[in-house]
Image (tube, helix red, strand yellow):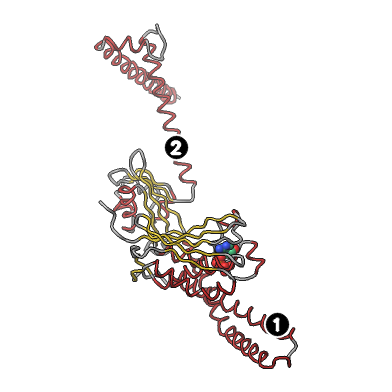
Amino acid sequence: MDALVVGFVVVQALVLGAAAGLAISRGRLIGRIRELLAEDPDANRRLASSDMGDGIDPEVAVRRLVDRASAAERRTTQVTRDRSLLLDMIGVGIIRLTDESVVETANIPAHQFLGRPAGSLIGRTAVEAFIDPVIETIAESARETGAAAGEVTLRYEDGPTLLVRARRSPVSGTWLIMEDVSELRRLQRIRAEFIDNLSHELRTPLSTVSLLAETLVGEAELAGEGIPSRMRDRITKIQVETDHLVQMVEELLDLSRIESGGPILLLDSVDLGRLAVASVERLRLFAERQGVSLVVDAPPDLPRVRGAEERLAQVLVNLVHNAVKFSPDGGEVAARVRSVGREVEVAVEDHGIGIPKADQARIFERFYKADKARRRGAGTGLGLAIARHVIESHDGRIWVESEEGQGSTFTFSVPTGEPEPV
Ligand code: ADP
């Protein structure tokens, strides 16, 4: 019992002692501030005329300031804790590096992605923290240029594929965001393999059907009036539709080859002006049949671009083919090539049906066809997806400007690869 009382008294004494200690240290702090105020005769006046209000006792003003500072500190602590919780809840990895490349903040997903125990990244240098030097390079490049991004598959067992984006902070340091895209890439691989297998399987029987249809058309022509005209029409239709199917399968194979066959090799020095002339020539007969005239506008002294000539020709043929296909009888299609800064720009312009605003953002997706085109039935909806892939492999851009009923202009630009002028 006595021990309990003694214990209680000791605890009380400790609590009182701690409170007294706090009061004394606070009193000391205020005392020190008063000393400083006494050393600086102007300070009292400044303090009295500050937002603490005129005519207030400096000691009260100082107490208020100290209280305000403590409240602000408490708020900062709360905001920091709140921010950490939010960072941990987000499914992406977030890391903040100081200007000296030391990890200052790292949320739980960042630790998980990098295969580290929670909290162990803080205070480590970028070299120690990141398993793969590519992440460090991305961070460094963002520090130098403002922003950088890249994809990396970590090489530990079952290591994820991460899409890493880094931005230099306007205040200090660099932020890194890491997204786990392993599942997405796996599904994309499966889809590409599926399309590849399917198109290979379809190609042989379709080629046979196409050959048979062609033979039938020839035989029907030879038979002349021996075959009713309705039957001849149907045979011709079978051939047209079969050709359409064969083209679709070829484009599917092309797309999966381009997407899964590694990077497109940029080995040729390409004159896009000459390529535009050649591509337009390939389509002249088709255009004539549609009653569409073709013009090319390309200066002779264009800078060359580094690229894959055959692929760029494929893009040009596709754009001109579409332009003719969607032009009215008597329309004109123009291919214009020009040099803009350190890029060469190619624009294919038509005055055809145009593309509704709502469809414009989607026509570069696989199989996407605007409503009117769908009604027309022709085409696979793959040409522009292939074009975008090819142009982006050249570090270029492709876009469309179009007004429904007025026409469309598809433009792509490819860098010349010339060094930046000093
Ligand atoms: P396809 O022409 O085989 O359908 P594309 O990928 O080349 O496939 O084009 C996708 C869609 O974009 C077309 O179906 C059509 O709706 C639209 N499109 C492309 N080029 C034009 C154009 N010049 N004028 C109008 N619509 C176009």
Residue 280 in percent (x, y) is at 48, 71
Disc 1 crowd rating (10 Å Cα; few below 14, some 14-19, many 20+) is: few
Residue 211 in percent (x, y) is at 59, 87
Is 338 above or below relative to 246?
above
Q: Nearer the viewer, mark 1 or mark 2?
A: 1
Amino acid at the residue labelled 2: Arg
Amino acid at the residue labelled 1: Asp
Residue 237 in percent (x, y) is at 67, 80
Which residue is at the front of the view, 32 or 47?
47
Q: Which mark is residue 233?
A: 1
Is 134 above or below relative to 376?
above
Ligand 1 quadrant? bottom right
CA separation in Å, label 1 and label 2: 76 Å
| Helix, strand or loop under label 1 | helix
Does the numbered disc 2 mark a residue whose Cβ is under 8 Å from ligand 1? no
Residue 409 visible? The answer is: yes
For the point 62% across and 89% down, the residue is 212
| Helix, strand or loop under label 2 | helix
Is 187 above or below relative to 21?
below
Disc 2 crowd rating (10 Å Cα; few below 14, some 14-19, many 20+) is: few
Which residue is at the front of the view, 139 or 223?
223
Q: Which mark is residue 81?
A: 2
